[in-house]
Image: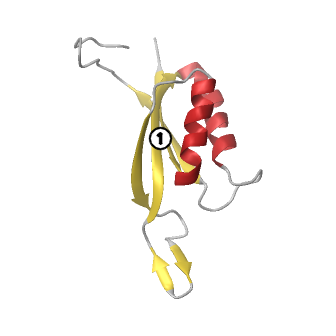
Amino acid sequence: MYVMKMIKAIVRPERAENVLDALLEAGFSAATKMSVLGRGKQKGLKVGGTYYDEIPKELIMLVINDSDEDKVVKIIVENTRIDKVGTYGDGKIFISNVERAVTISSGKDEL
């Protein structure tokens, strides 16, 4: 059975292009990027007297072969972290199985 994975990575806006460039260089050219707002475990950010509960992030999505999962996760982590050990707010990666993919122009199943 042919298995594919959907990778959804929520990253800092200033790191998104680094991630996309590194993925492209590694041969993963198909990706979707969109701007999103959200908050993580910290429930937002307090700067001075102002509390921000919706932080701008970028969502990068791609579908890959199951065998490429670890490679893609490593690329995203290495190109998203602000420093080598990571910092709160660097982001999160979600991985799920893809049951079906249909190309709209041809109407054909791709899996």
Quadrant showing the C terminus:
top left
**Quadrant position of residue 78:** top right
- Residue ID at (55%, 35%): 20
Vertical placement of residue 63 versus 7, above or below: above
Residue 25 shown left or right of residue 100 in the figure: right
Residue 38 shown left or right of residue 88 in the figure: left
**Quadrant position of residue 36:** bottom left
Total labels drawn: 1
| Amino acid type, label 1 | Ile
Q: Is residue 12 visible?
A: no
Vertical placement of residue 95 versus 12, above or below: above
- Residue ID at (36%, 24%): 99
Residue 111 shown left or right of residue 74 in the figure: left
Vertical placement of residue 30 versus 87, above or below: above
Q: Position of residue 105 (x, y in %)?
A: 23, 15
- Residue ID at (54%, 79%): 46
Residue that numbered label 1 is attached to: 60
**Quadrant position of residue 71:** top right
Which secondary structure, mark 1? strand
Vertical placement of residue 33 versus 67, above or below: below
- Residue ID at (59%, 30%): 23
Q: Position of residue 70 (x, y in %)?
A: 64, 30
The crowding category of the residue bearing disc 1, from other C-alpha atoms within 10 Å (few below 14, some 14 to 19, many at least 20), is many
Q: Decide which of 37, 99 is in the foreground and name it.
A: 37
Q: Is residue 22 visible?
A: yes
Q: Position of residue 92 (x, y in %)?
A: 55, 50
